[in-house]
Image (spheres, grey):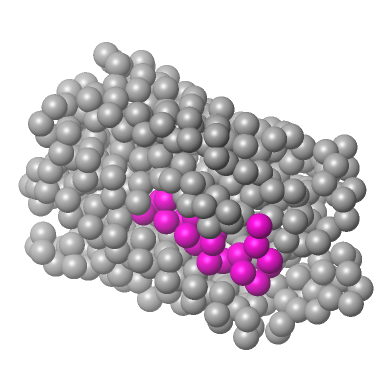
Amino acid sequence: MRAYTVGLLTFIYTANYVDRQIVAILLPAIKQDMNLTDTQLGLLSGLAFALFYATLGIPIAYLADRYSRKKIIITALTLFSIMTYCCGLAQNYVQLLLARIGVGIGEAGTSPPSHAIISDMYAPNERAAPLAIFALGINIGLFVAFLGGGYVAQHYGWQMAFKLVAIPGLVLALIAVFTMRDPPRGMSDQTDAATQDKSAAPSLREVALYMWRTRSIRQMTMATTLIITVGYGAIAWLPSLLYRVHGMNQVDIGLVLAVIIGLGGGLGTAVGGAVADRLGKRDVRWNLWLIMLVSLATTPFSLFAYTNSSSFWTLILLIPPVTVGALYFGPTLAMLHTLVRPDMRSSASAITLFINNIIGLGLGPLSIGILSDALEPRFGGMALPYAMCATALISIWACYHMFIAAGHLPDDIAATQQAADPQAQVTR
């Protein structure tokens, strides 16, 4: 049943990501159809969605730590699927922007409860791998969004693409009604039953203060926010880069990005979670060291890819960074859920996602759009590549915070385990 639940939640997260990111492959067509600026496109793909997605995730997670996580996930899944269909009905920019806001509102309710359910089913030293499998929803979703979205947009229009990808989410909601199971809170941690009582769950203020006072969580949140800023910016604008600079059509763009990001990134995410679990058993700090080293190694590939004049070499150079783009997800989420109590997990995830997404998802695509518009008078067709390079350099800053977080991690985990069990120890 554990494997089935992880699988079902992964498919739900896949639907979440398809509906969230299909707009990236559709941006060139939307720009042409509605005569929009890059700043407007950045708002559409970033801040308009992220503001509501991140903000509403916190009160929804607060409820998820107290009430049925299954019902919350199903309600949210149904809502964002309906609103994605509404994107396909939009006749102007304002209508499309409002529909995207609706998608963000719906998607706010799926991730934090899903994180908590998975962590409740697996022991602390087993969590990185199943959470990494859950994170495959990112890459599978991007594969479907880029491949299917590019094809449908090319042949039937961008509005039809929105309508078609909304359908699987409604089917999954029906499946979840009859087959999803919500495990007891703290099941894998062998916590006292009192902590599973909804009245005993801590307030959001308590959770936020606990996270702020825990040095590794504080630094890890800064690092993941910066990583996500780079990642969401790249995902949102890569189709436009290939369309404008390299003259590729939507079908070809969808195909190559589906293979590179969808398949390659999925492999990197899964392998990364397994490697982090293995190395983390020797030294828990490897969960974060691995992310830091991989980010440092792949940043130069992004810079050369964005500025290369050859389509072939641009795609080849993109393979290393996109393969490991979501590697951070499983290990950092596993560490977060190890550092907080079971009755804090949904809220801790929501607070982390709020910070990650307000800045990363909200400002990543938007900042590239604004910078591209600002650079266009001077650099013309190279304005977008240069804007993307500026964002890619943020990865180096992220690595600094990840290194600091790793240094505090053993002591913080030991303190958390000591509070729950005086006999607990942590592998260092």
What secondary structure characterizes most of the magenta part? helix
Give, as a single range, the part of the protein colored magenta. Answer: 121-139
| Residue 369 screen position, x and y as percent | 32, 40
| Residue 175 screen position, x and y as percent | 48, 35
Vertical relation: 295 (above or below) 141: below
- Residue at x 74%, y 34% (from the top left corner): 67
- Residue at x 77%, y 40% (from the top left corner): 204
Please identify the quarter of the rendering in which residue 122 is found: bottom right
- Tell whether 85 sits left or right of 341: left
Please identify the quarter of the rendering in which residue 271 is found: bottom left
Q: Nearer the viewer, residue 29 or 335?
A: 335
- Tell whether 53 sits left or right of 282: left
- Residue at x 38%, y 26% (from the top left corner): 84
Please identify the quarter of the rendering in which residue 14 is found: top left
Q: Is residue 86 visible?
A: yes
- Numbered disc total: 0
Vertical relation: 12 (above or below) 413: above
| Residue 428 screen position, x and y as percent | 70, 84
- Tell whether 291 sits left or right of 351: left
Q: Quadrant of the N terminus?
A: bottom right
Q: Nearer the viewer, residue 296 or 420?
A: 420
Vertical relation: 343 (above or below) 106: below
Q: Nearer the viewer, residue 259 or 289?
A: 259
- Residue at x 29%, y 60% (from the top left corner): 263
| Residue 158 screen position, x and y as percent | 21, 28
Q: Is residue 44 visible?
A: no
Q: Nearer the viewer, residue 170 or 337?
A: 170
- Tell whether 124 sits left or right of 425: left
Residue 135: in magenta span: yes
Residue 149: in magenta span: no
